[in-house]
Amino acid sequence: MQPRIPKRIIQVWCPPAGKDAELSILQRASALNIKLLNPDFEYLFFDNKKVDEFFGSEYPEYRKTFESFEFPIQKFDFFRYLAIYRYGGFYFDLDVFLASGLSSLLDFECVFSFEELNRNRFLRQHYGMDWDVGNYAFGAAAGHPFLKAVIENCVRAQKDPGWVKPMMQGIPRFLYPEFLILNTTGPTAVSRTLVENPELAKRVTVLFPDDVCDPRNRHHFGDFGIHLMSGSWRNHYGWVMRRLVWMWRVWTWHKLMKASSKLGKTRPLVASGRPSGRNRVQVYAKS
């Protein structure tokens, strides 16, 4: 019998020392929006104290890894995978807003969404994968093996810099910290896990838009919601650096869009090594 996602929603807010511990008005609105649209779902909220208790009672073997991450967002990422792996349900960032309830997704066993076309040379050249899986919103049955593989890769990335190194090809030094996060615990790490585990990928449902090349379709949780990309974890650069970052992003985006547009509007297939019909990532569109 196929495992199903339970009626549970998990969110977390663990600000670092010195930061405001209170949720912003946008974060409170996000949490309320999600709860109001899913009134019969259990809602679990984790703050610093509850995260600490979680590692003490559920996964003490991962506490050292959790504490060893350099950036707070890496800890957020790692915790979200462990929490859904342990309890099952849906995870949402506190800048995600839903347009409808989640009941129609409960029959699936693991749901992620298309994030955007990626800039990762390693995934593009070695696996023919020009898109990323989003980790700002996802759902899974408790104990799902794909989440276990994601967790193991987060641990591997922390212990073995050589595993991460190929993912950092072509990244400017001034953006190295940001992409290190994406490639060790963030969306690109999840994407690599998906493409390198084609058998597990068969058990993952990916919410794709009609046209992956349309920039208006980025950061959507299918037709169910949208990620506002508040980016509170990113570096706040000075004017000169912001200009350099903007110029690099625009240049790479136009360059990669030319290559991605040749592949068409859809990305229903992912296989280890190159796209193939033998290993299908499921596609689901809300009717």
Image (cartoon, rainbow, N blue to C red):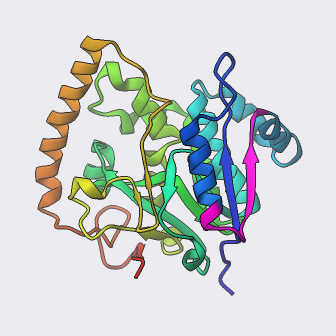
Would residue 186 be visible to someone looking at this image? yes
Location of residue 235 (image quadrant): top left
The percent position of residue 118, horizontal first and vertical second, equals 30, 47
Question: Count of labels shown?
Answer: 0
Residue depicted at x 47% and y 64%: 99
Is residue 149 something that shows in the picture?
no
Above or below 70: residue 116:
below
In the displayed structure, 173 sits above or below 222; it is: above
Q: Is residue 24 left or right of residue 52?
A: left
| Residue that appears at 51% across and 38% down | 184
Q: Position of residue 2 (x, y in %)?
A: 65, 83
Position of residue 41 relative to residue 247, above or below, is below
Q: 14 and 159: which one is in front? A: 14
Question: Is residue 116 found left or right of 222 in the rendered image?
Answer: left
- Identify the residue at image location x=23%, y=66%: 211
Q: Is residue 57 left or right of residue 179?
A: right
Residue 109 at x, y = what percent?
60, 74
Q: Is residue 207 magenta?
A: no
Q: Which segment is the magenta one?
A: 36-48
Q: Quadrant of residue 160?
A: top right
| Residue 6 at x, y percent in the picture | 70, 71
Position of the N terminus, as image quadrant, is bottom right
Quadrant location, the C terminus: bottom left
Q: Is residue 42 magenta?
A: yes
Asked whether 222 or 262 is in front, the reply is: 222
